[in-house]
Image: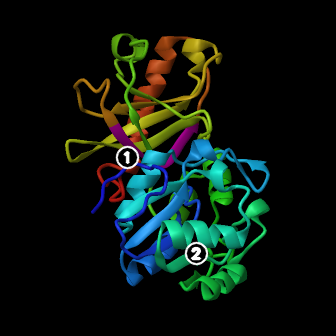
Amino acid sequence: MEQQALQPAIHPAGRRITAALGLFDGVHLGHRSVIAEAVSCGACHAVTFAAETMPQKQGHPVRYIYHDELKRRLLLQCGAEAVLALPFGEIAEMDGAQYCREILCEQLHVSTVVAGADYRFGHGAACGADDLIRFGKQFGFDVRIVPQVCDANAVPVSSSHIRTLLESGQIENANFLLGTDYQILAPVVTGNHIGSTVLSVPTANQTFEPWQCIPRNGVYASFAAYNGEMIPSITNIGVRPTVTGGNAEPIAETHLIGWSGELVGKLLPVTLCGFLRPEQPFVSLAALSVQLQADIRTRMRLLPSKGSSGTA
């Protein structure tokens, strides 16, 4: 399997490929159905856009669920052989026919294209599934359109709905629609050491990208993946009001329960499994310390050992 980073689309060594088309933000159940269909056709390449090249979607700002590297890993886990990121700024002005001819045919040499029923392309997102089928006939590639995946209430699974769930703390519902537990994947950065020296709850601190959708501020039951082990943990997402007064950018602080070691600089996958409580200010660090111990007990009672199998 090709383990390449997101990059501008490249000529795939003359091979005719199956292109799975989509933004794939979150790699949710709907996206996974598109990838599965493409994999069934063979030589699946997921064709997407790097987040920094596409700050808006159909004229609206986008706050992405995942950053590019995590999206790449998840798409490869789903069976894509490679992930190709088209430079959105260079193709945004192309109409649908030009995109299909120059990108899909001349650059990628596709034999088959797979997309969801709601896929849009071309300048101003003017083209849809029917247009893709028409251009496929015109330019000589097969097209498979995958029906929308819906939840138990017949509501289509969408990244925008999942963002709403994340931002309101409904992590279990978001996880169901994502097809795996929501993940944080970022290097551990140096903190202020209050957790380790004052609270006796050392944390691995991780930042979010400026354009990311950030889950609701609060404390979550989580697992941290380290050295092949899923370690039970609690994760606070927020601005740390007791320490900073609330004047800070949101970060994720994860305490690995019963584990000790140095994590600064390491790329740490953390999965969120349940929402325990909102973030709140405390009258003192001592009061915060008491609450954190209660959070740990609650977390271990609710979810003692089982970790997500979908960690990147």
Q: Say which residue appears at 34% left-offset and 10% top-offset.
A: 197
- Percent x, y for residue 230? 27, 47
Magenta stretch: dominant SS?
Answer: strand
Where is residue 203, by image quadrant?
top left
Q: Position of residue 282 (x, y in %)?
A: 58, 18
Badge 1 marks a residue whose secondary structure is helix
Name the residue carrying label 1: 301
In the image, residue 134 above or below residue 259: below
Image quadrant holding the N terminus, namely bottom left
Q: Which residues, given as a range, are shown in magenta?
A: 268-277
Using the image, determine if residue 156 lies above or below residue 252: below
Q: Answer few, some or many: residues within 10 Å of disc 1's Cα (few below 14, many 20 plus, some between 14 and 19).
A: few
Do callouts 1 and 2 mark residues in contact (Cβ within 8 Å)?
Answer: no
Q: Going by the image, does 67 lie left or right of 44?
A: right
Q: Nearer the viewer, mark 1 or mark 2?
A: 2
At 64% from the left and 64% from the top, the residue drawn is 158
Q: CA distance from mark 1 to mark 2?
A: 43 Å
- Residue wearing tag 2: 115
Please determine whether, in this image, residue 4 is positioned above or below residue 195.
below
- Callout 1, which amino acid? Arg
Q: Quadrant of residue 39?
A: bottom left
Q: Position of residue 174 (x, y in %)?
A: 56, 57
Say whether residue 261 is left or right of residue 280.
left
Disc on the earlier residue, 1 or 2: 2
